[in-house]
Amino acid sequence: MNPAVEVMAFFLGFIGWVMSGIAIPHRFWKVSSVDGNIITAAAVYENLWKSCATDSTGVHNCHEFPSMLGLSGYVQASRALMIASIVLGTFGLIATLVGMQCSKIGGKNYILKGRIAALGGVFFILQGLCTMIAVSWYAFNITQDFFDPLYPGTKFEIGEGLYIGWCSATLALIGGCCLLCACGSGNKQEKRFTISSDLILSVSCCTRATVEP
């Protein structure tokens, strides 16, 4: 395994994990649109946990969603997926930190460390998939309502929190793929080295047996 690739993958996974933590409580997952016939003095924005409104004077009024079961299904699913992404990212960071060659944690069994690092890559990929599904599903519902001419409620546009989530998912997926590729190539090289060593040892034993009377 290439230590530089491992460090880069760990860094990408860590940045993606941090950005997921920023995206979850971010205020602006969706923002009310100014397009339409009705002009209001208040702007409405929502995230996974609360809905807020601000007027022309800059005063923000927020209230948390009163009931989880009363929320739309995609909001509940996005909550669960984002929390799962944080948990999976935490496991990925721990596994990668233990499995890196430059880390002294876990001893000097590099074959075992490589497998642990590959497991960290799998966790990073799962983290990225959870985040990508959550923000994409949320954005799909926003655009679906926005382009529906018969939708009677307030129309929203995609907010900053979703863009942060997409960046987080992309970084986590890249980091996980880098770890898996690095560990896969490293295991192949180790197997070739082991086979070559076994062949050399066998040839040496045969040669000695032939030379000895």
Image (cartoon, rainbow, N blue to C red):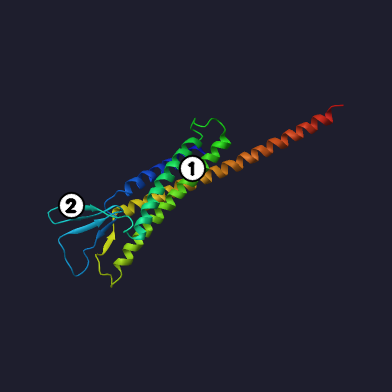
104 up-or-down from 30: above or below: above
Secondary structure beneath dot 2 equals: strand
In which quarter of the view is residue 144 placed?
Answer: bottom left
Residue placed furthest toward the top: 213
In the rendered image, residue 156, in percent from the top left (x then y), is placed at 27, 62
Q: Is residue 193 left or right of residue 184?
A: right
In which quarter of the view is residue 198 placed?
Answer: top right
* Dot label at residue 128: none
In which quarter of the view is residue 76 placed?
Answer: bottom left
* Dot label at residue 60: 2
Question: What residue is at 53 percent from the left and 46 percent from the top?
Answer: 181
Q: Quadrant of the C terminus?
A: top right
In the rendered image, residue 56, in percent from the top left (x then y), is placed at 13, 56
Number of labelled discs?
2
Q: Is residue 111 left or right of residue 64?
A: right
Secondary structure beneath dot 1 equals: helix
Q: Alpha-carbon neighbours of circle 1 within 10 Å: few (<14), some, or many (≥20)? A: many
Amino acid found under the numbered disc labelled 2: His
| Residue closer to the observer: 65 or 25 | 65
Residue 1 in sight from this viewpoint = no
Residue placed furthest toward the right: 213
Residue placed furthest toward the bottom: 150
In the rendered image, residue 20, in percent from the top left (x then y), is placed at 36, 47
Residue 205 in sight from this viewpoint = yes
107 up-or-down from 121: above or below: above
Q: Which residue is mark 1?
A: 120
